[in-house]
Amino acid sequence: MSDQAADPSASLVELVERILAELDGTAVLECELRSGDHRVLVRRSLAARPIPAIPEVGGGDAVPADWQPLVAPLTGIFYLTETPQSPPFVTLGGSVSEGQVVGLIESMKMFNSVESELSGTIRSIVVSGGALVEKGQILMYVEPLGDLS
């Protein structure tokens, strides 16, 4: 108790960490706590709710040379579905066409389509829905149609 009185900001940080841990995986969208001069507001968008992960393929870092990476065109939160209730834009082993939307990236409260640059088969989905991605980060691998016989 004396440690909390000595550093009130440390106890506030611990409280926020505990709240976030408790809310993880729940359907709670907003939580506000007030104590004295402190106010903590946690707000999540509906799109930030957990989305079932699509399994990855490929053992470890071994990726066949003919698989082409699809990379994030900008930094933001990557989504594999349009809404939490929607089916994924693409599935493992599914076909994709050049220009087809394979996901969304939320950046600055705007949703930006991520389009495939080639036609082929989705062979590996590297990033799960709801993950923060950086510009240029690999999102998935596509085996081009030209290499399929």
Image: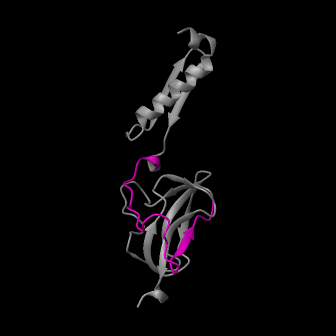
**Main secondary structure along the magenta-highlighted residues:** loop
Instruction: Give x and y (percent) for residue 38.
Output: 59, 20
Residue 66: say if magenta: yes
In the figure, is residue 62 to the left or right of 38? left
State the residue at coordinates (41%, 63%): 56
Residue 74, x across and y down, in percent: 63, 61
Give how far across and how far down residue 52 sits, in percent: 36, 54
Tell me how many marks there are: 0
Displayed quadrant of residue 59: bottom left
Q: Position of residue 68 (x, y in %)?
A: 54, 76
State how the image is colored. one colour
Q: Which residue lies most toward the top here?
A: 2
Q: Is residue 89 above or below residue 42?
A: below
Residue 61 vs residue 132, the one in the foreground = 61
Residue 129 falls in image quadrant: bottom left
Q: Nearer the viewer, residue 36 or 140?
A: 140
Q: Hey, which residue is sitting farthest bottom in the picture?
A: 149
In the depicted structure, whether residue 100 falls above or below residue 36: below
- Start and end of the magenta stretch? 48-74
> Which residue sits at x=41%, y=69%?
90
